[in-house]
Image: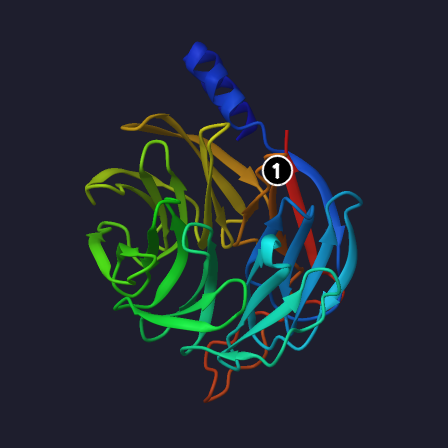
Amino acid sequence: MKKLLLAGAFALGAGAAQAQQAAPYRLLSTITIGGEGGWDYLSVDPAGERLYVSHGRQVEVVDLKTRKVIGTIPDTPGVHGIEVVPAAGRGYITCGRTNTCVVFDLKTLKPIGAPIPTGPKPDALFYDAFSKRVFLFSNDGGKSTVLDAATGAVVGTAELGGDVEAPATDGKGTIFVNLEDKGEVIAFDAKTLAVRRRSRLAPGEEPTGLGYDPKTNRLFSACANEKLVVTDSKTGQQVAVLPIGRGADGAVFDPTTGNVVTSNGASGTFTVIHQDSPTKYRVVGDVPTARGARTIALDPKTHHLFTCTADYGPAPAPTAENPKPRPSIVPGTFRVLEYGK
């Protein structure tokens, strides 16, 4: 494969040189965490130089200066997403098994008050600096519980009409989310919570990860059927559809490099797509990661990419309750992978 890529690069000349410059990602470090349990989102706090990693029933806190685990936030059953609000000195964690949100102190990592009840299966969450609100998105039932970011008080519920996945914001009062079960990306008002626009993503199906470029008003929806769908956030019109790897559950856009990157857990790759212009996109290539590395976080300061995974063992025997069991996770192998130039 490597020889074929090199041959193609020579044939393409200047275009290949641009492609190589657009995606110079390689594995920079492996941060061993260990322990047991599954994982979902990672979240970079550039101000605090920390990486928050969901892991089983807890959140692992990594110092990005030393690449060492410096703390753990326990008692977060079914943890999915982590979001921090440095101005408020607090962070928020969605707990899918208890339908709650845990609030914690950024300095001590200790909980602040009792967990906040949410809608069913809270998954992704997002802090919107424009409205100063934290949005907790349910992956079942189409609701979003909305909190005051400074106090944690519930200030509303958004009715979004589908199972919500990853969010983004334009920074001017509009929030975007993928609806996994509807095959849509929607826009809603951060203050009134009213849905403004629904855009179909077909031929994309079951969208999860969502990247956004506010300069060109482009949304990047990573779909389960190995497609990335590019949508104009102002008009809802589809701009492009590109191939990506299997099992994508994350997508980011880096405005400095012009790269859209999807994390593909089944393929064990990042797919890198370059935005040549608001209407022209090209697949640069796939970067090997590891099986199970399905989510992604971008550090806007260093432009490094983070994902996480563990080694897999055999699947347990099927049962009536679980006819298609997932492979077991080998204890002690959970790790974070960091990519960059």
Residue 205, image x, y percentages = 29, 56
Outermost residue, bottom side:
320
- Please name whichever residue, 212 or 328, is drawn nearer the observer in this view of the structure: 212
In the image, 260 versus 245, the foreground residue is: 260
Residue 7 lies, in percent from the top left, at 49, 17
Looking at this rendering, what residue extends furthest in the top direction?
13
Residue 45, above or below 121: above
Residue 314 visible? The answer is no
Q: How is the image coloured?
A: rainbow
Question: How packed is label 1: few (under 14 Cα within 10 Å), some, or many (20 or more)?
Answer: some
Please indicate, yes or no, whether residue 246 appears anywhere in the rendered image: yes
- The residue that mark 1 highlights is 304
Q: How many marks?
A: 1
In this rendering, position of residue 189 left or right of residue 3: left
Residue at 40 percent across and 45 percent down: it is 171
Position of residue 251 in the picture relative to residue 59 (left or right): left
Position of residue 184 measured from the top left corner of the image (x, y, whole percent): 25, 56
Point out the image quarter for the C terminus: top right
Residue 28 shown left or right of residue 158 in the figure: right
Residue 297 place in picture, x, y as percent: 56, 48
Q: Is residue 83 left or right of residue 66?
A: left
Where disc 1 sits, the SS reads loop
Question: Type of residue at label 1?
Answer: His
At horizontal 66% and vertical 78% (from top left) the residue drawn is: 75
Seen at 36% across and 32% down, the residue is 215
